[in-house]
Amino acid sequence: DAKTTQPNSMESNEEEPVHLPCNHSTISGTDYIHWYRQLPSQGPEYVIHGLTSNVNNRMASLAIAEDRKSSTLILHRATLRDAAVYYCILDFGNEKLTFGTGTRLTIIP
Amino acid sequence: DVKVTQSSRYLVKRTGEKVFLECVQDMDHENMFWYRQDPGLGLRLIYFSYDVKMKEKGDIPEGYSVSREKKERFSLILESASTNQTSMYLCASSSLHSGAEQYFGPGTRLTVT
C-alpha cells in the first residue's frame, strides 16, 4: 500500500498562511489524497480531499503536484484554533484510511 | 448536523473484564470503523463494517471483536480486557462512495487496571 511522509512538526505565526507538505511518491492513479486534522481532545475531522486537480473549500486549499507524488495543504490565514495534528492520507478506494502520525502544527500568537 | 456518538468519554475497567464500547451514527452511513490511538503510533484500524452483520479485520484485530446488528450501531467488544488495551478508542462512519469522508466520534478513553 502507498504511504505518505509528513514532517513531524511545524510552526507558523498567527494570521500568516501555512503550507503543510506531504510526500506520496508511490501513489497509484486511483488513490484519493485526503487531509484530516485532530484538535486537542477531539476525534479527527475531515479537512479536504482531491484526486488530480487542486481543490478549495471553506477550510483550506489542496495543491496537488502534476505527477501526484506530493501535495500541500494550505491554510490561508492561520488562527490559534488551527493548532492541531494534520494527517495526509491516501484512500485506495476501499474506504479504509491508514493514518500515520501526522504533522503537529503550532500557531504562534 | 452530522453526528457520531460514543457511549462513554472515559471508562475504567479491570483486567479480565468484558468491555463493550458502543458507537451510533445518525447519517445512514453504510461504513463504520473502530480505531485505537496511542502516543507515537497514530490511529490504527481495528475493525470495520460495510453493512449490517458484515465485518472486516483491520490492522490490529487481535483481542477484539465487533457487532453490527443495526445499520446505525457498531459495537467494539474486548472479551477479556488487558492492560495493553488501555488506549483512546475512536469510532467513525462514512458513506459508500469513493473518496467519502469519515466522520469521527469524540473518542472513549479506556483505562484497564
Image (cartoon, coloured by chain):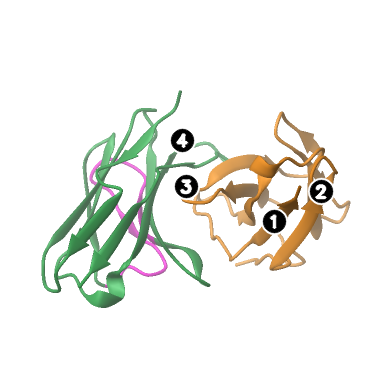
Chain colours: A orange, B green
Q: Is residue A62 magenta?
A: no
Q: Is residue A66 left or right of residue B47?
A: right
Q: Secondary structure at mark 1?
A: strand
Chain under callout 1: A
Cα–Cα gap, marks 3 and 2: 22 Å
| Residue B107 on image: x %, y % | 37, 50
Q: Amino acid at mark 4?
A: Ser
Specify the segment rendered in magenta: B46-62
Disc ID at residue B95? 4
Q: Amino acid at mark 1?
A: Leu
| Residue A13 on image: x %, y % | 82, 50
Q: Which residue bears the numbered disc 1?
A: A105
Discs 3 and 2 lie in a common subunit: yes
Mark 3, Cα crowd under 10 Å, few <14 / some 14-19 / many 20+, is some
Cα–Cα gap, marks 1 and 3: 15 Å
Residue in the foreground of this view, choosing between A18 and B59: A18
Q: Secondary structure at mark 2?
A: strand
| Residue drawn at (85%, 43%) of the image | A16
Q: Secondary structure at mark 4?
A: loop
Cα–Cα gap, marks 2 and 1: 9 Å
Tell me whether the residue at label 3 lies in contact with that at label 4, contact meaning CB atoms closer than 8 angstroms: no
Chain under callout 2: A
